[in-house]
Amino acid sequence: MEIPRRKLLRLAAGAAVLPALSQRSTAQDYPTRPIRLIVGYQAGTAPDLIGRMIGQRFSDQFGQPVIIENHVGASSNIAAELVVRAPSDGYTLFELTSVNSWNVALFDNLKFDLLRDLAPVASIYRGIGVVVVLPSFPAKTLGELIAYAKANPGKLRMGSGGIGTPQHLYGEMFKQMCGIDMLHVPYRGGGRSLADLLGGHVDIMFDTLVTSIEHVRSNELRALGVTSPTRIALLPNIPAVAEVVPGYEADGWQGIAAPANTPVEIIDKLNRQVNLALADPKFGARISDLGGVPFATSPSEFRNFIAEFTAKWSKIIRSADIR
């Protein structure tokens, strides 16, 4: 029996709509099974802790387990590659951090493109740094630090957790903007660098606030400035570096990403839950305890932020020829 041409066209049009309807139905029902959240750092680190906080939120709201998987190595590039290769169905997520933006300039052979192969879902946290020295250090203010460094070029030992870490890059930006030279002393981890600062083996660190604040509170270290654009509630008497070096702002961030082409409906559903969590004072207080501030955006705002952040730091990294 011959089927009329008009009927064939209607059947073909209906068949084309079926995949879209199926995808929409899947997104509406999401999630129906456990979600994997891939973290590129060891258990107990700030990205791991933030990931577990958000994972618990997803689990509570969606009624499905969220399994945290720590895949450590290559400055979280191993974890990122795992997510890039995962199905775009919302069941494999990535704890995205500022390190992934820095890696764009630090590594010449990345096997993925940050914003082409990953879909930003939601930002969570912006971390703050703090300039710390021993109480016996001769400079008592940021202005005195800059003057001392200019009078003693290359003599100040600046400790960090390694090449391309926040401590290194925050300090490098300070050096470039102030026109000073300090000797970079990289360690295998920020904890070792901090221990040597406390022991007097290095002179200064641009450390993450979460790891240094208790030493500042106990007067084991003196804070000269914070790297946020303005002063912070945790250290209200400590100036922002920007008060002395206009335009200086150095912070890290964390958020959630998914493989590229994950359905928009799934991304929006996840984004809503993250932003609801960030609006909860208890959740915000836990972020403050980790030395940061809640950072809420839409998926498109987060994508634009990452693009601008990556461009800014790539210029600094390449200018300093950091590899």
Image (cartoon, rainbow, N blue to C red):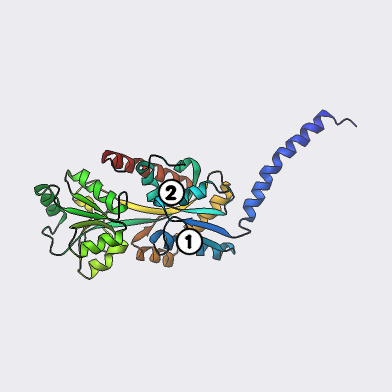
Q: Look at the image and tell me in which quarter the C terminus lies.
A: top left
Q: Which of 154/121 is in front? A: 154
In screen coordinates, is 248 left or right of 270? left
Label 2 amino acid?
Asn
Q: Position of residue 109 (x, y in %)?
A: 41, 40
Q: Where is residue 262 in the image (x, y as percent from the top left)?
A: 56, 47
Q: In which quarter of the image is residue 17?
A: top right
At horizontal 48% and vertical 40% (from top left) the residue drawn is: 116
Q: Say few, some or many: other residues with alpha carbon within 10 Å of mark 1 (under 14 / 14 to 19 / 20 or more).
A: many
Depicted 32 relative to depicted 305: above or below: below
At horizontal 28% and vertical 54% (from top left) the residue drawn is: 167
Q: Which of disc 1 and disc 2 is earlier in sequence?
A: 1
- The single residue placed furthest to the top in the displayed view is 5
- The single residue placed furthest to the bottom in the displayed view is 218
- Describe the element under mark 1 as helix, strand or loop: helix
Q: Where is residue 64 in the image (x, y as percent from the top left)?
A: 59, 63
- Describe the element under mark 2 as helix, strand or loop: helix
In screen coordinates, is 94 left or right of 107? right
- Residue 54 - label: 1
Depicted 256 relative to depicted 300: above or below: below
At horizontal 40% and vertical 42% (from top left) the residue drawn is: 307
Q: State the residue position of label 2.
A: 77
Label 1 amino acid?
Ile
Q: Which of 189/92 is in front? A: 189
